[in-house]
Amino acid sequence: MNHRLAAATARLGLTCLLMLNCTAQAGELTVLSGNGARAAVTELAAQFERASGHKVTVHFDVNPDVKRKVEAGAAFDVLVLNPPVLDELIRQGHVLPVTRAMIGRAGIGAAVRAGTPLPDISTVEAFRRTLLGVRSVAYPGEGASGKYFVSVVERLGITDQMRTTMRPMPAEYNVEVVARGEVDLVVVVASRVAGVAGVTLIGPIPQELPTWIGFAAGVGSRANAPDAARALVRFLTAPAAAPVLRSLGVEPFVE
């Protein structure tokens, strides 16, 4: 852990200790989260667990699958999802509206296997040439960033040329296959690359093309540990969490 992250961890620990609910009797929390902010959610959940004494178990999946599980009756205390997905579950009554809080956002980026030359994605035309020049491109088969990448390929007018090189992947593998050398390039929400060994983030795709993927949290309407769940949401969105979020590819939300 670097000095900046260590300092942020200490501040977050103090933040948690100042929260009344964190000093209450320890409980167990179940978090269902999308994959986009996996590294940040994993780190912050672990810090909350250490500081509060509450055990936190996080299950990651693509946003559509998390939504389906919740609609099918899956038990959870906290959700971390893209805002439109979370808002739909709020409308359905699965999440308490008053607990909805923005964590942050991340842009779409491209990454390659560590140690390989970094292709040029600095302009729209350079990005187009890079996409056409690689043998394979991974992207999430489901989820906001994957759908957006498909739309970018269409916008660039290269859908037909890339039919044999596009590799839609399950969320838990789309970055890791690049680390293993099975795919040349991955285009995904940039925060997903954080914490994956063997992968180098080239950078964001050109500013004329990118979109932002947001991350929001909320407490389940039937949470088993509602007080601890509310404390976790406050912890994820506290100003002291900002350095941790930034270090793991997420731009913190600022009102």
Image (cartoon, rainbow, N blue to C red):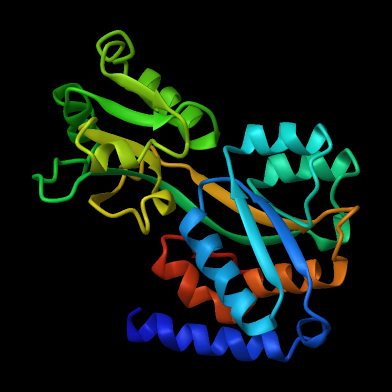
Q: Is 155 displayed left or right of 220 in the figure?
A: left
Q: Position of residue 108 (x, y in %)?
A: 40, 44
Taking 211 as reference, is 177 left or right? left
Residue occupying image coordinates x 27% and y 15%:
162
Q: How many labels sit on residues?
A: 0
Q: Residue at x 30, y 36 (%)?
A: 177
Is 193 situated left or right of 128 in this image?
Answer: right
Q: Which residue is the extreme one toward the top?
A: 160
Residue 210 percent coordinates (x, y) = 41, 41
Asked if residue 102 is positioned above or below residue 3 in the image, the reply reads above
- Left or right of 58? Residue 68 is right
| In the image, residue 231 above or below residue 66 | below
**Residue at horizontal 50%, vertical 27%?**
147
Q: Quadrant of residue 133?
A: top left
In the image shown, does 88 or 48 lie closer to the viewer?
Answer: 48
Work out which quarter of the rendered image holds the N terminus and state it: bottom left
At x 86% / y 57%, what residue is drawn?
A: 223
Q: Quadrant of residue 119?
A: top left
Residue closer to the observer: 43 or 36: 43
Q: Nearer the viewer, residue 252 or 126?
A: 252
From the top left corner, tell me how far across and down residue 105 is, in percent: 53, 55
In the rendered view, would you say 41 is above or below 24? above
- Quadrant for the C terminus, please: bottom right
